[in-house]
Image (cartoon, grey):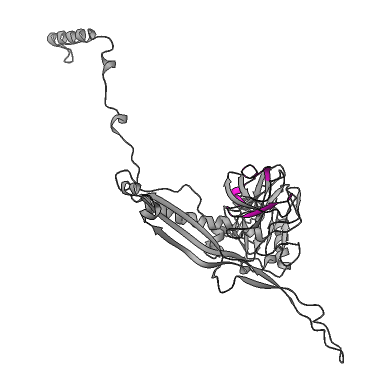
Amino acid sequence: MANQNDLSIAEYIGAAERNLRSSLMPPGYFAKQTYLQVSDVFTATYGRKVWDALNNQTRFWNILRKVQWGPTTGWRVRSDRGSNRSRPVTETGALPTVDVSAYQAVDSAPRIMATDFGVSLKSQIMSGLEGGMGDNLAVEQEAAARDHIKELNSELLLRSNGIVTVGGASATGAVLGAGNTFRIGDTISDSSLSDASKVISGITGNVITYTGGGNLTDGAIAYAKARAGLTSIDDVVEQDARVVAGVTVTNGADVYNQTTRTAGAWNAAATVLSNSGTGRNLTLSLLDQAIREVRINGADPDVILMGYDQFDRLSSLLQAQQRYMDWGEFVVKVGDESTLPGSHAGFQVSTYRGIPVIVDPDIQTSYTSADAELGSNVYVLDTRYLELAVAAPTQYIDNRDFFQANAFVLRGLFYTIGELRALRIDTHSKITDLNA
């Protein structure tokens, strides 16, 4: 019996004919065929959700106490008890000599910080079409709101000085990390030009454009004499006659209306633990000393502020103290901000010696005399003597007057008016010249 899978004679002949015709196709016949491809018919569209690839954390801003500005621009600090006004008196002895306390006047005017944005009318209309963001103005408004608070936080954490990496005149001279040290409108000087002041009008990378004051000198230390924006905590915790990256800065960063910052005086930081621009690792003894010096001045520090690099190092230092005990995780609230999770064993720190550890990505670094960045600074603060005085809370306004703008554009603006007040300058300390 024949296999049922075998072809019949007619089918066999038909297949042979088809094969013959196929073999007679001209060369390249199939290569000449064209097909509709993805690139011919598909256009990528993007969803209306916009993801922000930026770090918007504002932890230092969050922990500060906000108060109304009040009717004055200044405050007084009592810096001396008066000599011999308190002493023992014998049974018939004379009373102590009348003397008076010494009162120091500190003042700082409100500072204005603004964040603006704008979109064209045409882009606003087209944003509602397929592939658009839905509402360009709303998306930009939301982004500007985040950027405004981020700028406030960044200004509060600007470093007070930077090393000049390129000497020269305005638009030529450069300062290491200029954008993390200064803002447009700041008045600065440098260690080689005494108090010759320069007013910054532009910052491009590390290059500074300014008016007045002559040239910047390579290797000198440029420092803030007056801030256009918020006074930074690094401006507060600074001293005159300190060696910065191998350079003795006789007249260091000024703060408020104080033109001198003598170490140990009422208007100087409790302690600046520096190392002349040579990096060293954070140690528990350094941190203990910074805490002790603040306490010696009569303060009780309630926040340790540092960057993520120093937080990791502190965690490593405390790892040896970890004990195998019942596990428990906790966080500490400071203002509107929480510490990172910690355990009572002390490995992943939430507090150190009972003081909350707050980590902020905007903490600035120190630097070497060779123009190299080091690790971030560590601050020991008593926030009872720090406040954000608000003259005008953050407000939003927009403008859709095409005639005024002389263009078909929609504009918006956030602004805040206030200032950081350090009611006692000597209740804070910092550790600088640390390795990352």
Q: Is residue 167 magenta?
A: yes
Judging depth in this view, the residue of 402 and 381 nearest the camera is 402
Q: Where does the magenta region start and end?
A: 164-192
Q: Residue 294 is drawn in which quadrant?
A: bottom right
x and y percentages locating residue 91 in the rendered image: 86, 91
Please name the residue shown 68% across and 59% down the image: 254
x and y percentages locating residue 17 in the rendered image: 17, 8
Indicate left or right for 83 with 4 as reference. right
x and y percentages locating residue 73 in the rendered image: 60, 70
Q: How many marks?
A: 0
Q: Is residue 20 visible?
A: yes
Please name the residue shown 69% across and 64% down the image: 258
Judging depth in this view, the residue of 356 and 407 nearest the camera is 407
The image shows residue 2, relative to residue 94, as above or below, that is above
Q: Is residue 61 magenta?
A: no
Judging depth in this view, the residue of 425 and 392 nearest the camera is 392
Please name the residue shown 15% across and 8% down the image: 13
The image shows residue 38, relative to residue 434, as above or below, that is above
Q: Residue 230 is drawn in which quadrant?
A: bottom right
